[in-house]
Amino acid sequence: MWFYPKVLAHRGGGTLAPENTLAALRCGLRHGYRAVEFDVMLSKDSIPVLMHDSDFGRTVRGRGRVADTRAADLARLDAGSWFGAGFTGEPVPTYEQAVNFCKANGIWMNVEIKPSPGAEAETGRVVGEFTRRLFDAGDALPPLFSSFSFDALVAAKAAAPGIRRGFLADVIPPDWLDRLQALDAVALHTNQKHLLPERARAVKDAGYGLFCYTVNTPELAREILGWGVDAFCTDRIDLIGPDFAAG
Ligand code: G3P
Ligand code: MG
């Protein structure tokens, strides 16, 4: 079962803006996207922030680790200049800021829980609690959680049983059905590179949603949708429109 949009902007704005920033979310919106995937990690003071890497250096200027840095200090770092001079000073947003932006603009979220090493259960718990609070008002369709970390999803489920989960796996493991059942998940999220049509069929026949990352050409999108894939995220929001149709 898949209850959500079909095409999502990966990391906010794909490769058109610095990933996991408010600038990325604005970019996705400008391209007509009302569905987004982003990554969420905990700061030192246990505030969820949008971030992919646990270490600075690639997208955040400087040296250090997200888990060793307070959210207020993360907000002062530069998460934009790696992408382009026009984005210099773009801050690391909190999850709450991103949710508020998405709610205000009618954007649905796939929240990928991305724990720093060793913080799997804690990250799942805190993101679960934040999400529960942020969507308490019932004013927006709650996000779908996903994670490569089974433990993070177990903790997210305990903290926010009403927020649905998808299990993320680069390569679908042999025990995928057990894992989905154990998590009471609604979907399997996987890398399109390793997906085979027979496996896609098996997941669909078992009654689960099937989501792929990262699909960057219309040809590939058509092919996997033809296999029964329900949804995907893309880096190429300029090539693949939010209303992309396989037919
Ligand atoms: O959630 C799908 C995809 O984002 C997983 O890989 O490394 O881009 O977070 P990554
Ligand atoms: Mg991700």
Image (cartoon, helix red, strand yellow):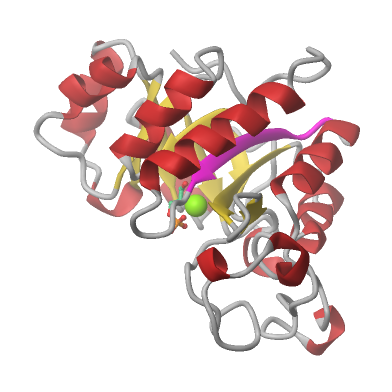
- At x 26%, y 29%, the residue is 200
Which residue is pictured at 44% across the width and 20% down the height? 158
Residue 67 shows in the view: yes
Residue 240, placed above or below residue 8: below
| Residue 108 covered by magenta stretch | yes
Q: Nearer the viewer, residue 40 or 26?
A: 40
- In this view, the residue in front, 206 or 239, is 206
Residue 157's spot in the image, x, y percent?
44, 21
In this view, the residue in front, 149 or 191, is 149
In terms of secondary structure, what is the magenta stretch mainly? strand
Residue 33 falls in which quadrant of the image?
A: top right
Q: Position of residue 14 (x, y in %)?
A: 63, 60
Choose between 186 and 239: the one closer to the eye.
Answer: 186
Is 55 part of what is drawn in magenta? no
Q: Residue furthest left?
A: 174
Determine the residue positioned at 48% across, 44% down.
123
Q: Which residues are magenta?
A: 106-113
